[in-house]
Every structure is written in C-alpha cells, then in structure tokens.
Amino acid sequence: MSLRSTLYWIAHALLVNNNTIGNADQLKSSRTSLKRKVTFAAEQLINALNLNSNVSESYATLRQTFEDFCICHEDYCELVLSDEKYESYRTVSSLNLDQYCKSVRDTYNNAYGSYNEYLAQKTTEKSKQEAKLALNTAKTTEEKLQFAVSDQCDAQPVLVFSQNALSK
C-alpha cells in the first residue's frame, strides 16, 4: 500500500469517527428535544382533558411524539452501546439509558392513564344519557316498561317488565 492510500484510509477513518461522534451528539440533542416535547405534549393532553377541548388531537400529538422519542432513543442506544468511546454518552443527569427512557415512558403513561379515565367517564356519561333517553321514550309512548339505571352497575340500562306488560 502506498503512503498516499495509507494516509487516505487514516483520514477516512478519522472522518468516519468524527461523523459518528457528531451523529451521537446529534442523536443526543434530538433525544433531549423529543423528551421535552413528550413532557409538553403530556401537559397539553392533561390541560385538554381538564378543559374538555381538543382531547383527541392532544392525544394524537402525544402518541406520535412518544413514538418518535422511542425510535430516536433506540437509535441512540444502538450507537452509544456499540463502542466504549461513547461511554460518557450512556449517562444523562445520573440516569442510565434505561432509566432515562423509563422517565419519559412514565410521563407518557401518566398522561395516557388520565386519557383512559377520561374515555371511561365519557362512556359512562353516554350510557347514562342513552338510558335516560330510553326512559323518556318509554314514558312518552306509554309502554309498560320500567327502566332502572344504577351507578352500581356502570350505568347500564336495565329493563324491568311489569307483570301487566308481560301478560299482554
């Protein structure tokens, strides 16, 4: 191998290593930015739930941002675990890679749990409204049906037929 090609390969190796370090810095920056975005999107979802406004859009934003974070975090982990020269990249604010990801996942899960509670509450309210509507309809058509709506049975409408209605 000539001196010229040896120098070329040395320069290429240095360039690749520098680009990889640059890649690690870029991924670290992206991951940090996405963590902030997940935190912000989680707060936005909680606010939307409290205001009962733009809930679906806020959840969609949170979900997409969290997915982006997970992809970026996976790429970052793959890179920094591939070589010992990235050892300093494996800890951020005294959190290792798994703990860092878990903190973001916990933020997401807390907001997602609130979202699920909101959906359950909306379903219960809808069931109660449907039961009330059925009761009002039954009264106006003078059917001999009685509706019982109980909070103990998750507001599911229960039909109770009177003896007169069953005998006809």
Image (tube, rainbow, N blue to C red):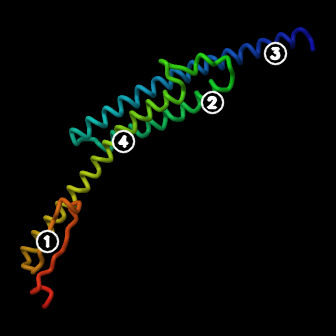
Percent position (x, y) of residue 132? 13, 64
Q: Which residue is mark 4?
A: 112
The one nearer the camera, 91 or 108, is: 91
Instruction: Tell me the quarter of the picture where residue 129 sits.
Output: bottom left
Task: State yes or no: discs 1 and 4 in contact (Cβ < 8 Å).
Answer: no
Q: Give the CA separation, mark 1 to mark 4.
A: 35 Å
Question: Is 31 drawn above or below residue 121 in the view shown?
Answer: above
141 relative position to 15: left or right: left
Percent position (x, y) of residue 167? 13, 90
Q: Give the CA separation, mark 4 to mark 2.
A: 27 Å
Task: State yes or no: discs 3 and 4 in contact (Cβ < 8 Å).
Answer: no
Task: State yes or no: discs 2 and 3 in contact (Cβ < 8 Å).
Answer: no
- Residue 147: which numbered mark, if any? 1
Secondary structure under the numbered disc 4 in the rendered image: helix
Residue type of the residue flagged with mark 3: Trp
Task: State yes or no: discs 4 and 2 in contact (Cβ < 8 Å).
Answer: no
Q: Tell me which label, 1 or 4, sits earlier in the chain.
A: 4
Q: Tell me which label, 4 or 2, sits earlier in the chain.
A: 2
